[in-house]
Amino acid sequence: MSVRNVLIVHDSKVIRNRLKYYVLTEFDSVAVSEGASGEEAVQKCKEQRFEVVLCGKEISGVSGIALYKKMQALAIIPEGSFIFLTATGTPENIKEFIEQGIAHYMVFPFTARELRDKINLVCDPRRLRIYERTYIPDTKVIIHSKYEDIDADVVNLSANGVSCDVVYSNDQHHFFGSTRITIQFPAEYNSVRVENVACKILRLHIMTWKNDGTPEHVHAAWQLLGLSAQNRKVIEEVLEESRKGFG
């Protein structure tokens, strides 16, 4: 799934709002979270995987570089995921970034398109599609709607989301508003389950229609929200196991 999770870390709400506006204006499949302090940013990265972290060079209580080093040491961010934001593009400032091994930075002011291009450089959506979405035969999703549980076949999944096929019936229209799913892996992965995960539906496609004009086969994509560390570990371990022999 090519949804990109972006974390904005800055102690200025005005700047966070501006960056969020830029990101949501330029991207369709994106989820944005915010952190006003280094401590809050670390906690969010422990709970959820972010493809990109937009971080001020100086934030409350810690320098952006110190925060970057801490997250690297904790292994809670992907390599090269940080984009540093600074108001001073002096040679000394840039030299510090280079010496610290920081590849991506932007100097205020910049446009929404310039930020889009930098994010695309850091996390190319084609790379996300190739390396993160995986097909695991016989994996199921249980969609927890208000009135009943609805079974679906998983098409592919990642630690960020899942696509599935649903055989639709006329009395299942309420599943569109569902906000919880369970992922059931097959016996070869010890039938492990990721229970009652918060999610939001991203896309729906009607694949086939019945003669009476109602949907018959629906393809749905869900974004997983706020996975616990344990649930993320379960999914990533299954994904890693499933890819053995296909590298």
Image (cartoon, rainbow, N blue to C red):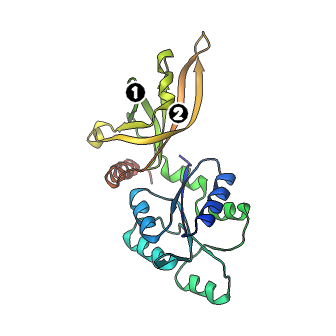
- Name the residue rendered at 67%, 58% in the picture: 22
Rendered-image quadrant of the C terminus? bottom left
Rendered position, 50 above or below 84: above
Q: Where is residue 196 in the image (x, y as percent from the top left)?
A: 35, 39
Let me know if residue 120 appears in the view.
no
Q: What residue type is labelled 1?
A: Asp
Q: Position of residue 79 (x, y in %)?
A: 49, 68
Looking at the rendered structure, the secondary structure element under dot 1 is strand
Q: Where is residue 231 in the image (x, y as percent from the top left)?
A: 34, 49
Q: Tell me if 135 is positioned left or right of 52 in this view.
A: left
User: Which residue position holds label 2?
Assistant: 220
CB under 8 Å between discs 2 and 1: no
Alpha-carbon distance for marks 2 and 1? 12 Å
Let me know if residue 130 appears in the view.
yes
- Name the residue rendered at 39%, 57% in the picture: 47
Q: Residue 151 carries which label?
A: 1
- Name the residue rendered at 53%, 23% in the picture: 217
Q: What residue type is labelled 2?
A: Ala
